Each structure stands twice: as C-alpha cells, then as structure tokens.
Amino acid sequence: MPEALLEIQDLVTSFKTTSGLQRVLDGINLSLRRGEILGLVGESGCGKSITSLSIMRLLPQPYGFIENGKILFNDKELTDLSIPEMESIRGNEISMIFQEPMTALNPVFTIGNQIEEVLDIHQDLKKRDKKEKCIEMLKLVGLPRAKDVYNEYPHQLSGGMRQRVMIAMALSCEPRLLIADEPTTALDVTVQIQILELMKSLQKDMNTSILLITHDLGVIAEMCDRVAVMYLGKIVEETTTVNIFDNPLHPYSQGLLNSRLGNIQKGEKLICIPGMVPTLSDKPQGCFFSPRCSKCIDRCKTDMPELNEVKPGHKVRCWLYVDEDY
Amino acid sequence: MRKYLIRRILIIIPVLFGVSIVIFALIHLAPGDPYSSMIDPNFTAEDRRNLLEAIGYYDPLPVKYVKWLGRAIQGDLGYSITYKEPVLSVILRNFKNTVVLSLTALALSVLMAVPIGVISATRKNTIFDYVVTVFSFIGISVPIFFLAMLLIKFLSFDLGLFPISGMQTIGSGYSGFMKFLDFVHHLMLPVIALALVQMAQLMRYTRSSMLEVIMQDYIRTARAKGLKERLVIYKHALRNALIPVVTVICISIGYLMSGAVLTETVFVWPGMGTLVYQSILNRDYPVVVSCALVMAFFILIANLIADILYAFIDPRIKYE
C-alpha cells in the first residue's frame, strides 16, 4: 500500500459565534495516499469545505480556528507551521480550486498576470520563461486560444474556461495535492464532464493526489478511488468507490445513494432521507444521524459510535456493525 | 475610448449652456438693483434712468442674456461692481488660491484616509477600528464651520501654532522663500479643517468598500496561491475596493474646486468660496453668474475624470 500523503488525525475545527463555540469539524480522521483521488461527500453544511480550508489553514478569520488534531502532509505537521512556511506550501505543494469559477478570479487582473503570480511566489523564472510556462499551462488545460487568453480578463471568459484557468493556476507548480471544492457544481452538465476528464487526465500525468469535495455521487463514481462520507462534522463511512456503490453500510450513505434520481422511474415519488440536517448548536445526543435514521436502535440515542474498520478497507461509524458479524 | 472621450467633452458645452440660462434667470429674478451703489446718490432720477438705459439695464431678459453670452464667449465675463475690475481677473486670482487650498486638502485626506480605511477594515472590530469609526463619525457629523472655529480656538488662539486667518502676515514685508513659508503657515489651518472632514468621509467609504471586497472569492483564491497577506490586501483587494472610492474622491474634487464656501469664509481665505459669498452680499451679479458657471464647469470636469479613472481601474468597463 502506498504511504499516505495527507493524514488528518482527530481534527477539530471550531467557530466563535455569538452563541458560543461551534464545533464544525468534530474529530475528522482521513488519509489520502499518493496519486489517489479521494472523494468527500455529504449534504450542505456538513463541514466538507471547512475540512479543505482547515488543511489550507485558510479558515475565515478571526472566527474559525483549529482547536485540536493534526494534519500531516508529507511528514510535515501543517497545524504547527508558521505563516510564511504555510504560504510557501499553498499554491505550491497544495493547491485549491473552488466551486464558483465566476468569482474566483480577480476581475481587475489579466489571466496571464494571475497565473504568473503563482510562479512568481514559488518559482524563480525569468520573465520570458514565465510567460512561456503560463501559456503552456493554458494549452495543457485545453484552452484553444491560449495566447489570447493570456492577455484577457476573467469577464471575457465563460464559466468553463474560467474553471480551466483555475486548474491551470492550481497545477502550475505541480502540486502534490489538489483540493477541489465542488469544482463542477456551478457549471453546465456538458462542461462538467469535460472539466472532470481534464482533472483526471492531468492527475495521471502529474501523479497528483486529489481531494475532491462534492455532493454529487455521479462525480464520485466518475472520478474517485475512495470515498469518505461526512455527516455533521464527522466521517461516517470511508471505503472504496466500488464498495460505497455496491455495499454501502452506514444508513446515511444508503440514504444518499437511494435519493439519486437514477433509482426511480418516471411517475414514481422521489426518495429522500427524512428530516433535516440539524443545526450545529442543536446536535442530537448519541449518534448525530439517529433522529433521521430508519434503523435506529436504543444505543444510537445515547452513545456516539466510533469509526471502526469492519472489513479491510471499509470503515463505518454505526452501532449496527459493532459486536456482530453482519 | 477616444470616441467616448470626445463625446463626453462635447456634451459639456450644451450642459454649460443650460446651466448659464438657469443661473442668469435666477440672478435676475432676485429683487434689487446692483448699480445703486455705483451711481452718485446726488444724481436726479432722470439722469439715473438715462445712465441705466445706456448700459442696457431695461432690456428684456433674453436680450440681456444674448448680449452677455456673446461677450462671455469672447472671454469678457463683465465688470465686477465691487472690485472695479474685469470679472475674469478677479476669478482667476481667487481660483488660484482655491486650487492650492483644495488640492492640498484633497491630497492630504486621500493619503491618510485610504491607508487608515484599509487597516481599519482588515482589523475590523479591534480598538484601532473603533477609534477610527468614532473619529470618522465625529468628522461626518460636526459641521465644518464649527470644526473650523474649534481649530482656531485651540490651535491658533490657545496654542498659537497657526495664524487665525488670511493668506499672509500683513505688513511683514516677507519676500522670496520667507514669503512662501508664511503662506504655507497660513494655509495649514484651513487645510486641516477641510482635510479632516474629507478624511472622515473617505475613511468610511474605503473601510466599507474594503470589507465587502475582502469577503470575495478571489481574495480566498489569492490566499490559496500562497500570496503574502500584505499583497493580498494591497494588490488584490485594494484595487477592487478603490473603484467606488474613486467616485467619492472625484465628487469632492468638484466640491472643493467650487471653493468650500464655509471653510474659506471662516478662515477669510480669498478663494472662490469667499468670492461667491461676498459677491452675493454685494449683489455683484456679473461675478456671481461667472462663479456659478466656473463651478458647474469643474463639477462636470470632475465627473469626466471619474469616468476616465474607472476605465483604468476596472477592465470590465469599456466605453464604446
């Protein structure tokens, strides 16, 4: 088994709010191997994006902070690094692309200027080499008029093109880890597939690991080697993509899979998980999912289960799979 | 862009034309006879009427306007009743003083307010931010003539740091560099008063504009690149935050160029503001009309400058 590139241990991230401290991430354990694509799924507000911002140490200031836990990246403990050390990692060894390509680029600088900025920070290139590298990156992400795009401003490009620019920017220093926070959510369906294929092929060429955050199970099936399912700041299931589709164990994962549109015929009622995601200030006792769970037993209402490895490579946080061979 | 500029500049002409009609009409609607003080009180009523008739006082308003306009286009803005010299030379002399005062105040306020606004936004809800906020609220709410009085009381009268009013020490006989220093010394107090008020406003605008920009996605992108926080703020955020601030600055150029009437009056600074004030009191119609036109002209110019600056700061703005 290839060694882990990113190892998150018991990560607790909290936000200071007017009603006191809110634990957004409640002990996350996650590991990402070299060259692997790991999917992170969950409903809105479960802490997917906060996980990525915690890794980048870009939590909204001054409200968000890492309360506890370790983030080991390439044998470095990210939570201990100084600000300049962290700056030299961002955009260089760990890059990030965001959900909204329409607003993620600065409207007042040219594309070339914004990509070259990353090279300026992390690489020592001559002016002409920088421009060459920049245009090469734009070609690599499949922009047809790379030389023109270099001099253009973000508002002159479409959403898909901007996301390609973001990818070019993120990969220009050949990072070991790319965090993609819902990279295709804001795009047209046809463009979504193009962007995903692009990411996948570049990932193979550069041997970059990807942490792919999404709520779209179709994207997971298309892209990921392994999947972690999150619910209310905790990982509830972690396994291979094949396992999650063929044999989901956690009732929440099962619920997510059942609510896919592909499962139903025309005229049938849509299937959904009953209830709403509780607010952070109102976390249920015991297992956080218990109030919405169809298989809830007495123990679920009092104690939070651990994330146990019930089969090799299949971890789940559920009392149903404790003390018994299922 | 060039086409747009030419069009914008040409538009100024009809606008000024309209402004001149309105001003001319308003002035002549006001009751009173500006020439009463020019004519020897010992003249008989008939002589007086003949004199007034000779200069066209009894002409119908449109005729007066056309006559006036015809001369104005040739640079003859009329003869000042109080100053006993051509209006143009009076205005030029006063305008020079206003330019010095207002540009110094503007430069000072921009140089202070923008950095303070930025720091206050990046350190939102710290003691620094609170102090700045309180200060700018005071600056916005205290009327400038009152602030000017306070400055005179404390800085000039109590501490004796600056002269109370005027542009030079009367009877000092300074020349050369000493004269210049004396001028700067007199300039300080009105500049401080004007700049404080301008600053208070600009700081608020910069702060709120900056707070909005800092929340944008592209700021997060800039940080995710590994950019130093200083560059994130002063390169990526400030450039965007300045767009609305430029509007405010340009509006105040128009306001300052027309002579901050209250400030100039309190400090007896012989600029456009004082000139307008005095001329209205003296019913010096030719001066009032010309001043109003000059002010309108500079407000139009300030707006034009704002539009040009937009295109430089924000590439999304294209003038076709």
Image (cartoon, rainbow, N blue to C red):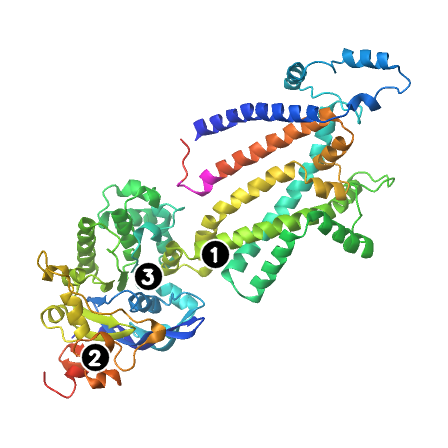
* Secondary element at tag 2: loop
Above or below, A237 relative to B308 = below
Give amino acid for label 3: Asn
Residue A2 shows in this picture: no
- Image x and y of residue B212, in percent: 45, 54
Crowdedness near tag 3: few (<14), some (14–19) or many (≥20) residues, C-alpha within 10 Å: many
- Image x and y of residue A112, in percent: 34, 47
Name the quadrant of the C terminus of chain B.
top left
Q: Are both tags, 2 and 1, on one chain?
A: no
Using the image as rendered, state which of residue A73 and residue B204 is in the foreground. Answer: B204
Residue A14 shows in this picture: yes
- Image x and y of residue A74, in percent: 28, 72
Name the quadrant of the N terminus of chain B.
top left
Q: CA distance from mark 3 to mark 1?
A: 28 Å
Give amino acid for label 1: Leu
Above or below, A11 relative to A155 = below
Give amino acid for label 2: Arg
Please tell me the numbered disc located at residue A92: 3
Provide the residue span drawn in magenta: B310-316
* Secondary element at tag 1: helix
Answer whether labels 3 and 2 touch (C-beta < 8 Å): no
Please tell me the numbered disc located at residue B211: 1
Label 1: chain letter:
B
The mark nearer the N terminus, 3 or 2, is 3
What residue does disc 2 label? A317
